[in-house]
Amino acid sequence: MKIGFALAATTFAIVQSTTAAVISTWNFNNGGTAANVGAGSAEAVATSFQAVRGGAVGDGTRSTNRALRVSNFDSVVTRSGHDGVGFVSSTTGFHGVGLEFWQMVGARASKWAQLEYSVDGGATFTSEGLANEGRYAIAAAGKYQQVSFDLSGIAGVADNADFQFRLMAIHDEVRNSFTTASGKRYSSTGTQGAWNLDRIVVTGTSGEAPATNDTFIPAPGAVALIGIAGALLVGSRRRG
């Protein structure tokens, strides 16, 4: 009986096999804002950009390992979610999309941010369906922290040439104001009021997305294997 079930499970795995892959990556080591892997670009959202030394991970020499510094945030301290950085990354041919990145905040920068995404080429952005509505905090100033999000269950993200996402500085919900990881007073300018971003990676699974129901139609080449599994199952029951 165990042999029959093992073969049937193997057949299902063969038919449904897919390949996980990196869709796009930004490491900023070339000093630009274009994706280093895949197609994509970075865009300032009411902020300024600068490539700086000192990336999150050692994926280059000391002189070439860079990060993207985002500065000149909103000076209107009562306005949340207005300034940040955006990214364009087509997900055509991929489902099960995920995002991970490394972020460091200055001593006077907002420690709170929100991930927003667009499925219509940037016409509209939302955080609907994301964990904690896309909100996250960087725990300590001057240190890189890895952040990741699962977008696999969000309609419209998969297989979309118009997919975009952005990271926006937001208020601390409890205090309803910009707060820092250092405890110092918020500042919108200067190095201490900046973010550093590095190793931004969009991942996905190539091939067709899994069916949304329980109906399983095997490929023609798998029918024979299922037949063998069934015969062995019957045989094992008779012997038992």
Image (spheres, helix red, strand yellow):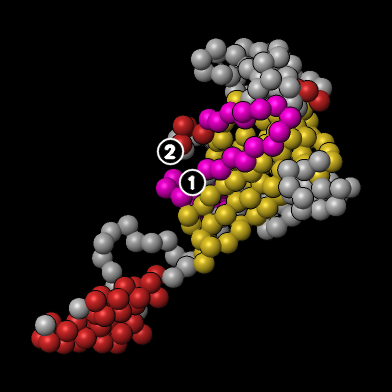
Q: Which residue is mark 1?
A: 151
Query: Magenta: predominant secondary structure element?
Result: loop
Q: Check the image and name the residue furthest to the right.
A: 63
- Residue 54, by quadrant, is top right
Point out the image quarter for the C terminus.
bottom left
Query: Mark 1: few, some, or many residues within 10 Å (few <14, many ≥20)?
Result: many
Q: Is residue 10 left or right of residue 44?
A: left
Magenta stretch in the rendered image: 135-164
Count of marks placed on residues: 2
Which element type, helix, strand or loop, lies under badge 2? loop
Q: Are marks 1 and 2 in contact (CB under 8 Å)?
A: yes
Identity of the amino acid at label 2?
A: Gly
Q: Which residue is mark 2?
A: 129
* Disc sitting over residue 46 in the figure: none
Query: Mark 2: few, some, or many residues within 10 Å (few <14, many ≥20)?
Result: few
- Residue 7, by quadrant, is bottom left
